[in-house]
Image (cartoon, rainbow, N blue to C red):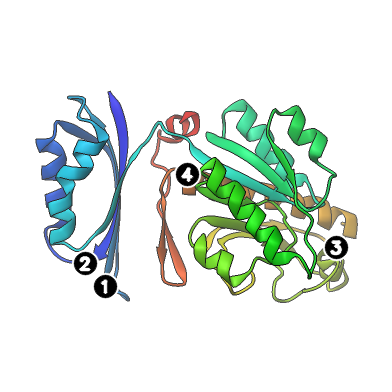
Amino acid sequence: MKSYVLTVSCKSTRGIVAAIANYLADQGCNIVDSSQFDDLDTGKFFMRVSFISEEGVAQDKLIEGFKPIAAKFEMDAEIYDAQKRMKVLLMVSRFGHCLNDLLYRWKIGALPIDIVGVVSNHFEYQKVVVNHDIPFHHIKVTKENKPQAEAQILDIVDQTGTELIVLARYMQVLSDAMCRKMSGRIINIHHSFLPSFKGANPYKQAYERGVKLIGATAHYVTADLDEGPIIEQDTARITHAQSAEDYVSIGRDVESQVLARAIHAHIHYRTFLNGNRTIVFPASPGSYASERMG
């Protein structure tokens, strides 16, 4: 039996849930998980439905048959093959903790994605990437060649069919044009001190101020640096007995975990853009293992 995910966003009105449930039942489909949210501030409705086609109805027929319902409610709706792995391009500079964490999760099956390549403006992690049988692309970035460098990256995106770009501590600011082109399809990770501690050595600055909580934020990339819609966050408690080096080590652990959770939510279609915010539906009880194995 084929598994699918239906995602819907539209203006909130009566009858949406009934129309979806009736359509799936008529197509011989069984709903195994459903989440929905009405945003009372914006009047928008969001829904994610995981279902099984018990009669083997093909994805293209499900999509075609759903079009009249989508038109009636003016929905942005998609039906995804739940078994199909999303194609992901990783980008990294000189800090490799997030990259190494993602490669490990991918290798053991905890992050069911197809890594189509790794782009870096340095060579530090070339051997690590190649040893995983993943294409490595070195693209040097300077003020003078930035448009050409981004054109190279977008060529890789097109050639590989990349569906998501992950900035695993890639320390170059993307242009407005690239952010617009890949809107909702680039995830970044940064320490949660922004905007309090900008510039070099933010963890050292936090240590000198006696910060008691450090953390990380994963968000979608927009033209506004580090201010895109937030997907996932977490913190760790710090005491006066810990050193500046401890801050860095703990902070990197939190960054790695937060980024992985954000990617996991995105690749299973649990995230919805809602203006400057995101709707992130949790994995249902008992479903994480099946989502994980993809």
Nearest to the eye among marks 3 and 2: give it.
2
Instruction: Read off the residue under disc 3.
Output: 240
4 relative to 254 in the view: left or right: left
- Foreground pick, 93 / 180: 180
Q: Can see residue 191?
A: no
Instruction: Read off the residue under disc 2.
Output: 12
Under mark 4, the amino acid is Ile
Q: Earlier in the sequence, mark 4 or mark 2?
A: 2
- Structural crowding at the residue carrying mark 1, measured as other residues with C-alpha within 10 Å and reported as few (<14), some (14–19) or many (≥20): few
Real-space Cα separation, disc 1 to disc 2, in angstroms: 6 Å
Q: Earlier in the sequence, mark 3 or mark 2?
A: 2
Quadrant into which the C terminus falls: top left
Under mark 2, the amino acid is Ser
Mark 2 residue element:
loop
Location of residue 130 in the rendering, given as x and y in whole percent from the top left corner: 75, 32
Location of residue 276 in the rendering, given as x and y in whole percent from the top left corner: 47, 72
11 relative to 253 in the view: left or right: left
Tag on residue 267? 4
Real-space Cα separation, disc 1 to disc 3, in angstroms: 46 Å
Nearest to the eye among marks 1 and 3: give it.
1
